[in-house]
Amino acid sequence: MLPTDLDRPAELTLWPGYAPARVAVSHSFPTLRAALAAAVAAIDAEDANPWIITEGGDILAPGWIRANTAAAVLQ
């Protein structure tokens, strides 16, 4: 992934983290930066397991999102 990918579209899928679930909620974002911010907010507020698919086809797992979403990364 390149820094320019932060400004490209991305899909965010949120799975509940508190119990097994069969329903996920998906959202489209105009930028990966916005999808990452929403993923972090969902982790903090909802105990969710976010997965992001970038326009380039990269799949960002919950562990990657948690490890790589420091404020400096999103700016």
Image (tube, rainbow, N blue to C red):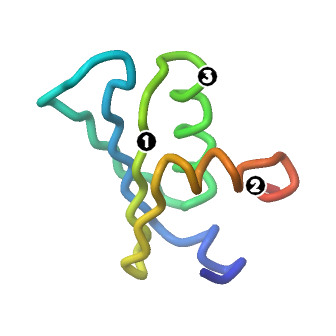
- Describe residue 37's horizontal placement relative to residue 10 as left or right: right
- In primary-sequence order, the first of circles 2 and 3 is 3
- Describe residue 23's horizontal placement relative to residue 28 as left or right: left
Residue at left offset 49%, top offset 47%: 62
- In primary-sequence order, the first of circles 2 and 1 is 1
Query: Mark 3 falls on what kind of element?
Result: helix
Q: Amino acid at mark 1?
A: Pro
Residue at left offset 12%, top offset 30%: 22
Counting other residues with Cα less than 10 Å from the Cα at mark 3, is it few (<14), some (14-19), or many (20 or more)? few
Location of the C terminus (image quadrant): bottom right
**How many numbered marks are there?**
3
Tell me if label 3 and label 1 are in contact, CB under 8 Å: no
> How far across and down, in percent of the image, does residue 9 sit?
46, 66
- In primary-sequence order, the first of circles 3 and 1 is 3
In this view, the residue in front, 28 or 67, is: 67
Q: Is residue 21 above or below residue 40?
A: above
Query: Which residue lies under the disc numbered 3?
Result: 44
CA separation in Å, label 3 and label 1:
11 Å
Q: Which mark is residue 66?
A: none
Tell me if label 2 and label 1 are in contact, CB under 8 Å: no
Q: Is residue 53 above or below residue 70?
A: below
CA separation in Å, label 2 and label 1:
16 Å
In this view, the residue in front, 70 or 20, is: 20
Query: Mark 1 falls on what kind of element?
Result: strand
Query: Mark 2 falls on what kind of element?
Result: helix
Q: Amino acid at mark 2?
A: Leu
Q: Which mark is residue 74?
A: 2
Residue at left offset 37%, top offset 56%: 11
